[in-house]
Image (cartoon, grey):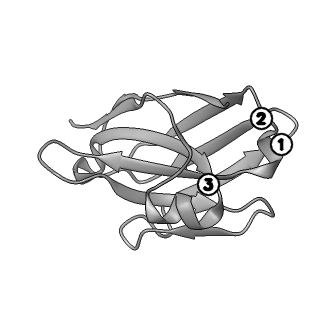
Amino acid sequence: QVQLVESGGGLVQPGGSLRLSCAASGSIFSTYAMGWYRQAPGKQRELVAAISRGGTSRYADSVKGRFTISRDNAKNTVYLQMNSLKPEDTAVYYCNAGSYHTVVAGRPDYWGQGTQVTVSS
C-alpha cells in the first residue's frame, strides 16, 4: 500500500512559478514510476508529466519547456517545478504511482488527493 500526499499548490500570477511536492509512504518508493495529472473544471484529467524509476521523463506538449518533473528517492518525494505559469494551467493537480505504463495510461495503482493550482491576476 502506498499513500501519496501532494502539497505546494496555491494562487499565483501569470508568469509566476510554483513547485508541487508529492510525498509517498508505505512502500518502496524507488520501485514505482510517478506521474502528475491535472483536471480543470469541466475537463478530463490529463497527464502533465511522468518519470520512470530510472529518471526518464515525459511531458505533455502544453507544458514542455515550462514544467520539470524530478524525484528524490532518499526523500520518497516527487516534484513538479512549474514555471511561466498560464491561466490555462489552473487545475487540481494529482500525483500517482505505478508501473511506467500504468502511470502514463492513467491507470496507476495509487492516486493522491490533489492540490489546487490557480493562475490568475
Query: In percent of the image, x 55 and y 38: which residue is there?
Result: 19
* Residue 69, disc: 3
The answer to which of 100 and 71 lies nearer the viewer is 100
| Element assignment for label 3 | strand
Q: Quadrant for residue 51, please give it.
A: bottom right
Location of the N terminus by quadrant is top right
What secondary structure is found at the residue carrying circle 1?
A: loop
Q: Where in the figure is residue 80, as x and y percent of width and height?
A: 56, 46
Please report contact status of discs 3 and 1: CB closer than 8 Å, yes or no.
no
In the rendered image, which quarter is residue 9 located in?
A: top left
Lateral position of residue 88 relative to residue 49, left or right: left
The kind of residue tagged 2 is Asn
Q: Going by the image, does 72 lie left or right of 12?
A: right
**Structural crowding at the residue carrying mark 3, measured as other residues with C-alpha within 10 Å and reported as few (<14), some (14–19) or many (≥20):** many
The residue depicted at 71 percent of the width and 69 percent of the height is 56
The residue that label 1 is drawn on is 73
- Which residue position holds label 2? 76
* CB contact under 8 Å: marks 1 and 2: yes
CA–CA distance in space, label 1 to label 2: 5 Å
Q: Position of residue 83 (x, y in %)?
A: 48, 51
Q: Is residue 118 left or right of 2 when viewed as pictured?
A: left
Q: What secondary structure is found at the residue carrying circle 2?
A: loop
Marks 2 and 3: which is nearer the front? 2
Query: Which disc, if any, is residue 96?
Result: none
